Image (spheres, coloured by chain):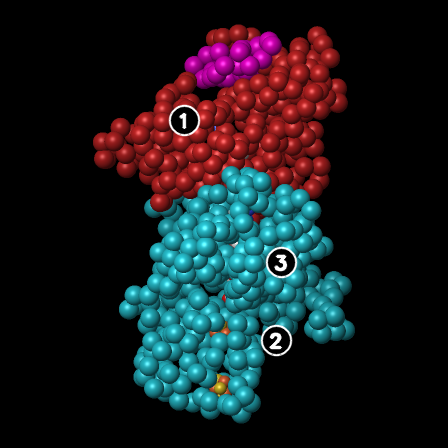
Amino acid sequence: MNEAGQLADKIFQLWVEAPHVARHALPGQFMVIRIDEHGERVPLTVSAVDGDLVRIIFMAVGKTTHQLSTLKAGDFIRDVAGPLGRPSEIRSYGTCVVVGGGAGIASCPIIARAAREAGNHVIGIIGARNAGFLILEDEMREACHELLVATDDGSRGFHGFAADVLKKVIGDQKVDCVWIIGPAIMMKVTSGVTRPHKIRTFVSLNPIMVDGTGMCGSCRVMVGGETKFACVDGPEFDAHLVDFDLLMQRQRTYFDEEKTALERYHEHTCRCGEGGHHG
Amino acid sequence: MGERPVTERIHDFLEVDCGLSPEEAVAEAERCLQCKKPSCVKGCPVEIDIPAFIASIAEGNFSGAARIIKENNLLPAICGRVCPQEVQCEGECVLGVKETPVRIGDLERFVADRERRQGLAIPPVAEPTGKRVAVVGSGPAGLTAAAELARAGHTVTVFESLHEPGGVLMYGIPAFRLPKDIVQAEIDQLRKMGVEIRTNHLAGASVPVSDLLAYDAVFVGTGAGLPFFMKIPGEQLNGVYSANEFLTRVNLMHADRFPEYDTPVRHAGRVVVVGGGNVAMDAARVARRLGARVTLVYRRREEDLPARRAEVIRAKEEGVWFELCANPVRIIGDKCVTGVECVRMDMCDLDESGRPEPSPVKGSNFVIDADMCIQAIGQGPNPLLIRKLDGISYGRKGNVIVDEEGKSNLERVYAAGDVATGAATVILAMGGAKKAARAIDRMLREQ
Ligand SMILES: Cc1cc2nc3c(=O)[nH]c(=O)nc-3n(C[C@H](O)[C@H](O)[C@H](O)COP(=O)(O)OP(=O)(O)OC[C@H]3O[C@@H](n4cnc5c(N)ncnc54)[C@H](O)[C@@H]3O)c2cc1C
Ligand SMILES: Cc1cc2nc3c(=O)[nH]c(=O)nc-3n(C[C@H](O)[C@H](O)[C@H](O)COP(=O)(O)OP(=O)(O)OC[C@H]3O[C@@H](n4cnc5c(N)ncnc54)[C@H](O)[C@@H]3O)c2cc1C
Ligand code: SF4
Ligand code: SF4
Ligand code: FES
């Protein structure tokens, strides 16, 4: 671990030394980390690379991500496997829009930069609940030709959802390709905007994973009526073919267990006085 | 020493079979007729000199017995436990005609366990040849190839995508059949022989194919880890697992000890396991140990179950209910599984394999209540690396096509184990890997 810090409310970043991932990772790929001997295997997007370092950005939602948020420079993560998944399909499309929501913004700059290098005109849209949750604004501004910002409560940028901003952008000009990365519900709603226009749209799916290499089927999703393994066939898929309701249903498989794990973690960190996070 | 009582063992993951005591081992060894033309040896895929090692046991020379076995089999503690002996060595033993065959597997295990407890001697390693070999995958095939190549003096690097080496031996076969410290001991020994094992390294990604091909030779032992699903309605419901996922969560990630370990597994009161092989038995017995009532659904008859006989019997003793000649047609539930609809199967004409072909009986549908359904209907070769190896020939089922010696059509690329044969057995994976390792060694020396 090289550097650690907080980016926004509940959102943290870590730079991890992992040469085998850093040297070969392409935009859109992810890695699986296991924090310690007792840890779960958790997938996180490779959000930037610098030499032998990879950056992960995550929202503290459950046990693992809370525990990750307490790590400091010099600490260790037990296992880092990757890069996993297929890279984004970066080509020369014309005008591209990269839409990020919440922690999903983490994956956006690396894709936007690559799309720009491939000769596209790149428009970025980032959205969050409020200004306190917004991340990587500067980095996205630099990566894109234009950047639009939206917050649900209007505390920064446009007052409304990223989907509303995207609708406007599509109304104003011809758009050839769109990436949408964020919570499942946000991807579902936002990809509804491009559907009637038949614009090629990619979403990066985040089902529950175990191995991340195609060996368990935990990550299966329905795309165009076919079962796909998100970790090897994706994580990016054609948004207009994805069954988002199923994705959301399957994400809730371990809802109760996740609650138990987090509560137990909080109790434990409080008792030990390690400075637990009350999210 | 026999087996631990059912009432005790279904509450834990400790080994079921306690193994033989020295007295029992000697007595069993004395049953062997020391045949001049031992048919048992023909039944062993790696041709262990069975009468010779048994004679050593009978003389009380246990370490001598270990030496004889190790000439042909580097992982006897594992094979003694998991080989399907009834169709291999023991199936051919002449004593089996009139009485019970010699318990060759148990004897092999006895010798290996004894040797391990006294501390394994590190096999001598030949003068370094300066040649580098990449071994992909650390299941029985990869471990065997690595050991053979290291012994021959080559520099071996093993790439394993998971965080633990061992392949199916670690993530698939449960500890009550194969305790993990046994696998660990074998892996430690490899390391002591100078083999470098890089976990978390997915060949084809963390190690690009061009880097792999820069080695003097590549051994592919990536196994058959791609789980098949039945493709019936309801398979996307929460609570439907592949056996691979279920077993990985419990064996590798210790979900049985959640929340002490972070990885959860669904808490199910009633589980349906689909399939009749070793994988299905393991899934059923693990589910039993997690406290569920378990029904195993298999489409053929009891005598057709491909699983090891001993494990079928143990599964039954442990209370797994067998619903035979039945096949699921639909998984029922709203968001989560609530039942599995099955249809009775009629055994009709013999199919290509000589087994009766089951066909559904119209109108015989019935529902088994369940909150979890585990599918253990087979696995195919993991396609990830194979697809990236430009020009390699593979069969319709995705298995790498190799010659007798494990050589693929690509220069310097060899493969063995499940990735070449399709899902098979530990001993076949090891046998194939050994041949391939010898061929690699020969090729490297000729260069
Ligand atoms: C390809 C991919 C890339 C991802 N990239 C990022 C990222 O860059 N930043 C980020 O914040 N999150 C990312 N996620 C989601 C992230 O993996 C989960 O938030 C994380 O696993 C939560 O772990 P936890 O223990 O903190 O929470 P838990 O309490 O375990 O779970 C909270 C939520 O996370 C989901 N989840 C739990 N376990 C897993 C798992 N093993 N795999 C996937 N989802 C799980 C659950 O459905 C639940 O909604 C990504 C997911 C995938 C599949
Ligand atoms: C639950 C279960 C029970 C079984 N019971 C028995 C039994 O009782 N007796 C018996 O003889 N056989 C049994 N088998 C079958 C036996 O385990 C296999 O035939 C044997 O393990 C095959 O060995 P292998 O080395 O070819 O592959 P595996 O053991 O599958 O090992 C392959 C390894 O390669 C790794 N890998 C894959 N792709 C890559 C990549 N691209 N880069 C890096 N690493 C990679 C995998 O993570 C894995 O660790 C069982 C199998 C299962 C699943
Ligand atoms: S390796 Fe397997 S088949 Fe060969 S003697 Fe041992 S138990 Fe029998
Ligand atoms: S066939 Fe049976 S009796 Fe004959 S040597 Fe082999 S184990 Fe002994
Ligand atoms: S995470 Fe196991 S197959 Fe995708």
- Of the chain colours in the picture, the one used for chain B is cyan
Q: CA distance from mark 3 to mark 2?
A: 37 Å
Q: Which chain is red?
A: A
Residue located at (67% from left, 44% from top): B390
Q: Which residue is mark 3?
A: B407
Magenta stretch in the rendered image: A125-149
Q: Which residue is mark 1?
A: A15
Element under disc 2 = helix
Subunit ID for the residue under disc 1: A
Residue located at (52% from left, 36% from top): A83
Whether residue A31 is in magenta: the answer is no
- Badge 3: few (under 14), some or many (20 or more) residues near its Cα, within 10 Å? many
What amino acid is found at the position of numbered circle 2 in the picture? Glu
Q: CA distance from mark 2 to mark 1?
A: 57 Å
> What is the quadrant of the C terminus of chain B in the image?
bottom right
Q: Nearer the viewer, mark 3 or mark 2?
A: 3
Q: For the residue with label 1, is its CB less than 8 Å from the closest atom of ligand 1?
A: no
Q: CA distance from mark 1 to mark 3?
A: 42 Å
Q: Is residue A160 left or right of residue A271?
A: right
Q: Position of residue B365 (x, y in %)?
A: 69, 61
What amino acid is found at the position of numbered circle 1 in the picture? Trp
Whether residue A135 is in magenta: the answer is yes
Compared with A166, B233 (above or below) is below
Q: Which residue is mark 2?
A: B303
Q: Position of residue B160 (x, y in %)?
A: 48, 48
Compared with B97, B305 (above or below) is above
Element under disc 1 = strand
Residue placed most toward the observer, B368 or B225: B225
What amino acid is found at the position of numbered circle 3 in the picture? Lys
The lab-note entry on whether marks 1 and 3 share a chain reads: no
